[in-house]
Image (cartoon, rainbow, N blue to C red):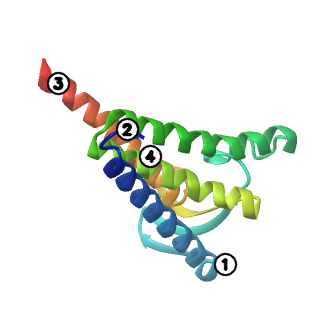
Amino acid sequence: MGKGTGIYLLIYGLTALGVLALDLYTKSLAEVHLVDKSLTLLPFLHLLLVYNRGVAFGLFSEAPDFIRLPLLLLTPLLALILTLMYTLRSKNYSTALLMGMVGGGALGNFYDRALLGHVRDFIYLSFGSLSWPAFNLADASISTAIVLFLLRGLLDKSGKG
């Protein structure tokens, strides 16, 4: 470990653990309170428990186990390794935070897949005939981090030119 990398590891680790804890807690709440029912919080925001055997949006949920399982179990581990390596190379506080969000989200869904055989999704967005597949806080953390990371890159480039 290089000099000065400890703070970035700490930010990454605390962020990942925070996302993981919040994700697992909200999934357990969903399993207790959303069994055989749904809640509408806003006209477009619903809480509805769905078990997802596939990857994002249920892709590969019907694939044979010899294809589906390695893909579902190895991808989050790869994401964890790559985000940690990127954090250590970048030596940037916001990168450590954003990569920790991705790593924590990957761990949350990995936990579900490895121990439960499916991912617990419970947030459902819809408006009229438009809808988005159900997701969870791990998914939201990963997506938010990627969008913020890309926006930061765009803003950094626009500020230099």
Dots 1 and 3: beta carbons under 8 Å? no
Q: Can you identify the residue that label 1 sits on? A: 35
* Label 3: how many Cα within 10 Å (few below 14, some 14–19, many 20+): few
Q: What's the distance in space between the residues labelled 2 and 4, CA to CA?
A: 30 Å
Q: Earlier in the sequence, mark 2 or mark 4?
A: 2
Q: List the residue tagged with mark 4.
A: 143
Can you tell which of label 1 and label 3 is closer to the viewer? 3
- Type of amino acid at the residue the image marks with label 1: Val
Q: Nearer the viewer, mark 2 or mark 4?
A: 2
Visible in this render: residue 49? Answer: yes
Residue located at (74% from left, 64% from top): 116
Along the polypeptide, which appears first: circle 1 or circle 3? 1
Secondary element under disc 1, as helix, strand or loop, is loop
Task: Tell me which numbered mark, 2 or 1, is placed earlier along the sequence.
Answer: 2
Q: Residue at x 41, y 45 (%)?
A: 99
Q: Quadrant of the N terminus?
A: top left
Nearest to N terminus: mark 1 or mark 4: 1
Query: From the viewer's perspective, is residue 138 above or below residue 73?
Result: below
Q: Secondary structure at mark 4?
A: helix
User: How packed is label 1: few (under 14 Cα within 10 Å), some, or many (20 or more)?
Assistant: few
Q: Secondary structure beneath disc 3?
A: helix
- Measuring from the top left, give residue 48's x and y in whole percent: 58, 68
Q: Which residue is mark 2?
A: 2
Kindly report the distance in space between the C-alpha atoms of the residues bearing marks 1 and 4. 26 Å
